[in-house]
Amino acid sequence: MGQQVINGLFLGSIYALFALGYTLVFGVLDILNLAHAAVFMLASFVALALVGGAHLPILAALPLAAVVAGLIGLLLDRVAFRPLRARADSNISGLISSLALATVFEAVALQVWGPNVSRFPLGTVPEGRPIPLLGAEVSRLQLVTVGVAVLLFVSLTWLVRSTRLGRELRAVAESPRAARILGVDVDRAIAAAFFISSALGGAAGVLFGLAYNAIAPDMGRSVELKGLAVIILGGMGSMPGAVLAGFALGLFEVFVVATFGASWRDAVSFAALFLVLVLRPRGLLGAAALREA
Amino acid sequence: MSALLEVEALERAFGGLRAVDGASFGIEPGRVHGLIGPNGAGKTTVINLVSGLLAPTGGRIRLEGREIHGLAPHRVAALGVARTFQSIRLFPDLSAEDNVLVGRHLKRSPSLLARVLHLPAARAEEREARARAAALLEGVGLADRAGEQARHLSYGEQRRVEIARALASEPRLLLLDEPTAGMNPVEVQAVAALIRRAAGEGHSVLLVEHNVRLVMDVCDVITVLHFGRVIAEGPPAAVARDPAVVAAYLGSAA
Amino acid sequence: MWERLVDLWGTYESTLGYIGINGLLALSVYATLSCGQLALGNAGFAAIGAYAATLLTVKANLPFPAVLAAAALLPAAVAVPLGLPVLRLKGVFLAIATIGFGEVVRLGIVNWEYVNGAQGIVAIPRKSGVFTIWLFVAAALFLFGRLRGSKWGFALEAIREDEPAARTMGIPSGAYKLAMLALGAALAGLAGALEAHFTFMVAPNGFAFGRVVDMLVFAVVGGAQVFWGPALGAAFLTVLPELLRELAPLVGIEPGPLRLLVNGLVLLAVILFLPNGLASLPGRLRQRRLAREAA
């Protein structure tokens, strides 16, 4: 039982990191960035290249891959979202345009690395004795994953609460027009949001790749929909909600697999998502508020 | 004469803000009934409540004795209520004539089968509906702009199309929300004539307006709203002299 | 000469069939887009139609017309209880809920042993050919064409442009949206059934999220403002990969990635520069020409 909890928290922290990026962009822009999962996947491949090709240790490759992911996020903003900002239906057209870039990213990954599953070279994650905790065992990888995730959550919370960028983001989330009038460089703030969001998604991707040691161009697919489930459950635009719901989903999945078997895992998650949307679309912590112009 | 519309102790709160706070008034059939008051008095909220876009948090609304508060907008419309919007809500991609045609929705009952099979009955129904729409546009002086996309019409033209669209459903009660906002005096006179004619043809009108002269000119009765409550009611001359009304307008930043 | 034609047909029959199937699927998404709803559960509806049809053919040996009727009616029936709660959701929430529905259907099939779960069913007798498929596409286009410009077509357009205003004119938007959801479900189910009896097989991985994304892309690239746009988009994007396959070796990219790359770039180009899709191209060019002549 304790082992399930630890496994659940481990999986949950990856979901939470991924969802955090998703919800950051949704909170600020009211747009669902469907390329998030593709960035998740690309970061994993970048880490693979750094570790396998450039022989970097994983602890260096992880932040580097996250930064590369952030840069891809900037590209995403510049090419897919910024040109559509002025349009009335910008959330639907933004969704479609991000879908287009996701397809392009997947094509690039397919061409460069092929469709088959790639793996990190042996010894990427230093083996060591698992650490006993609460009657169960925590592997080094699990510990580092949860640790990295918590570190990023705390940093992001600090950034949003206490820095100027954080204030600017909150202003843009309320009303871009008002923010602009108050002197905020809205385009720059949004670009920063994309950088952070994609870096978080990228970090999640690297950790996911390490966790399952299976990296493939279509690895984003299952996580993409789970990520949607998480941000709905947590409340669209709510960062603490995304974290909470991410952990909740991780735990939920581990328990469903233990009780019903692996094939039921996803079905139960989506059924839960569906019920939440119908019964309480705001999710746990979300605001139902509409955005002003 | 029993009232066409009765509003009784109507309340609508948004969180802590009471936009409408116990308003009561009645509209007699065939009359033009003005609803005025300083900005933020709750006039548009009253229109939203009567047309069904909002549900009241208290009080009642009755149309010919039948309770309509809380009904969905399309049901209220089916009972004979039509409206225009303060911020003009024409369908931007449709032409002026098509906009009015949509307004005719409640009065059309074509057969789906006849339409799919392209039968003469369907074609006749369509011709008739379009003819009505064209006539309504002519009635507001816009026959020559019938084919123009709504987004390309001038502001004044759009307002008139909206009125034509509202009249298309042959409503018993017409709710006009600041129909002359932003218009020049000539255009205002045209709308005044339209309103008088509509009333003459049997439509009752609830007119929300800021243009005091228009209201005095065209209305049979005026209700004055302030902070969501009725502070005066009566024929225009009496209301104009009412000290409470004067205080409300001078005292607030209207 | 005759043999050449037969050969050609053999090579391209599959493509021609898929132009039709994709056309139906694109129209199924258009049904709800036409009243402003982004409902993306159609992969689930197609799966229901495909599997229902397959079971009725393979286990009950019903005649094909009856099978197709069931394939259209069953998803439509499912759409009604689905739509009642879900159509109240706005914008992207509706999209996500319907995506969730599609996934639940797919995963339900994966876990259902009676239909072989993830492996699917094979050796379905061939009952639909290109002609049958295109007949249904023509019928669907005809139906949408008759709807446009009618009382109901205008009501749908009004709901798309401004739903609350439309309601104040007496248009019961809830009923219209539900009807369009059911119509879309019927078209998707029909497409699923036709595909199963055209390709001899049916499997849940053919109804994953990516499938409904394809449908949306057909509709957007073709142009979702007119009823024939989505069919045009489906045709264009079904034929394009075939052309690209010839091109691939010249460019030095594998056919698989090349197809995805071009799909992505076409979609991006459309959404950025031609948002109303290929269908709007003639109008745009005409406007450009008129503007130049006026200058």
Image: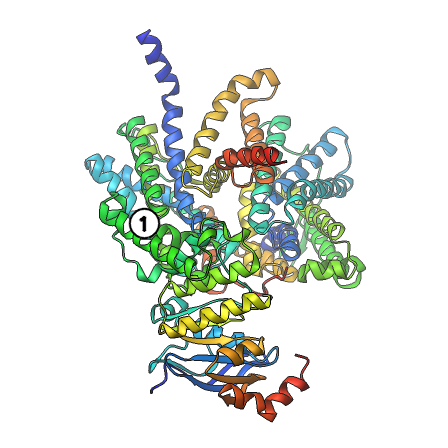
Residue at screen point 62% across, 45% down: A36
Camera-side residue of B212 and A163? B212
Percent position (x, y) of residue A130?
Answer: 68, 48
Quarter of the rendering containing residue C289: top right
Question: Dividing the image into 4 quarters, which one contains the N terminus of chain B?
Answer: bottom left
The answer, for residue B251, to whether it is visible in the render is yes
Vertical relation: A87 (above or below) B56: above
Display coloring: rainbow
The chain to which mark 1 is attached is C
Quarter of the rendering containing residue B4: bottom left
Give the left or right position of residue B161, taking residue A49 as reference: left
Instruction: Tell me the element at label 1.
Output: helix
Give the left or right position of residue A145, taking residue B94 as reference: right
For disc 1, the marked residue is C76
Q: Residues within 10 Å of mark 1 (few under 14, many from 20)?
A: many
Q: Residue furthest top?
A: C1
Q: Residue furthest bottom?
A: B243
Vertical relation: C198 (above or below) B149: above
Percent position (x, y) of residue A32?
Answer: 59, 50
Percent position (x, y) of residue A218?
Answer: 56, 36
Percent position (x, y) of residue B133?
Answer: 38, 57
Residue at screen point 49% across, 65% down: A280
Q: How many marks?
A: 1
